[in-house]
Image (tube, helix red, strand yellow):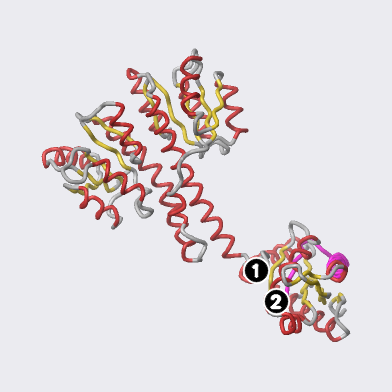
Amino acid sequence: MSARVLIVDDLLPNLKLLETKLSMEYFDVVAAMNGPQALAICEKGLCDIVLLDVMMPGMDGFEVCRRLKTNPATAHLPVVIVTALDEPSDRLRGLDAGADDFLTKPIDDTALFTRVRSLLRLKAVQDELRSRAMASCALGIGDPFTLAAADTGQGARILLVEDRPSAADRMATALSQHHTVTIESDPQRALMTATEGGFDVALISIDLDGVDGLRLCSQLRSLDRTRDMALIMIGETHGMARLTRGLDFGVHDYLLRPVDRNELIARVRTQVRRGRFSHTLRGAVQASIELAVTDELTGLHNRRYLDRQLGPLFGAATDEEHGLACLILDIDRFKSINDTYGHEAGDEVLKAFADRVRQHTRGIDIVARFGGEEVVIVMPGATLADAQAAGERIRQRVEAAPFPIQRGARAIAVTVSVGVAIRHAGDTSASDMLKRSDDALYRAKADGRNRVVAEAA
């Protein structure tokens, strides 16, 4: 996996050494020799990951990291702090600043390449979500990036898989201050619990008694219900090869024994925030998709969705010789509602009308706002009698109870006229069926409104 790696170090020999190592692995390298340069490069989107030295004059690496992670435009960038410092307090300070990982000088090549590739894989997934979520900003849904970057990383559900009781108790006690922790010592029970529990993070000992903890990690990564859950391995210093293997197949992070309490809390918080970042972006993508095919006022499908779905449904009904019916519903004298009570009252009527229509349609039916006060219902597999019966149920439901307006201060009577048609063998397209429905609706209006009229025989 190739990518653009930003190396930030004020010492040219250190910078050149890392640049040579990464270039030999076919990474593109960008360099900065101080914090402001690094921030400028990141804000311009010129890198995919940051290798950041701590000891720099002026703005140190911790401050650079903090600024990157609190800026919605750069919060998604993985940051690996590279330092000669190896005290738990230094790691904690970096994690508190938002660092995704640490490399200690002198840098081990295997650790360097494994960490970079692991973080880039995670970023690639988030980049796809980010590009799609950009559409939600353009559609006026809001700024998902600011919302995601502001998350505190607390209040998560944590699954701890550990068969050493004293270690499990210590970790659970530390994490329980900010999270809900479930402990499992048996990997099979842990797998079942994970698939049912909706956990944010799983902490897994890879040295379970008689069991390969990496196997459990692999299973969790492969299942649909746990694929998005963050995984943190717990292992020994002498087991780095196995930890590296876990990172290679998608585990997110690891902790070394003896587990430092503060580092545990900080790494879990980082994974929770990263997971919620992705979840927020997925929500923004889903919202933008729904907005593209949904009428904002009524919550029904819009005309664009109807046009895209009607053709394939018409073709399928023709090929399989199944029925297909179409109803066009129009609120009677809707203009007078707007003129008498105002457009806000008209909107209230449209929303309530859409709710009543939804209550009397099937899950397979397409219900779409056609324009103004008109709603179209397409019923796959329905006969003319089925469609007439559905239209009559809706008509009765609309007439049966007044519609509240002016935020419930008063209520008005509303009726609806309905035109019904079905697909004919001689129809060349769905528009032929729609035209007959519209003609039937016109006759319903002409005959006195508040009625269901089927197409002429």
Indicate yes or no whether the magenta region holds residue 321. Answer: no
Disc 2 marks a residue whose amino acid type is Ser
Q: Which mark is residue 297?
A: 1
- At 41% across and 28% down in the image, what residue appears? 264
State which region is magenta.
Answer: 374-395
Image height of 245 relative to 33, above or below: above
Q: Quadrant of residue 263?
A: top left
Mark 1 and mark 2 lie on one chain; the one further toward the N terminus is 1
Provide the residue designation for mark 2.
431
Where is residue 71 drawn, in percent x and y? 35, 52
Where is residue 360 drawn, in percent x and y? 81, 61
Indicate yes or no whether the magenta region holds residue 387. Answer: yes
How much space separates mark 1 and mark 2, taking CA atoms? 26 Å
Where is residue 303 drawn, in percent x and y? 64, 71
- At 85% across and 86% down in the image, what residue appears? 446
Secondary structure of the residue carrying tag 2 is: helix
Which residue is most to the bottom? 446
Can you say which quadrant of the picture contains the C terminus? bottom right
Task: Report the front residue among 293 and 8.
Answer: 8
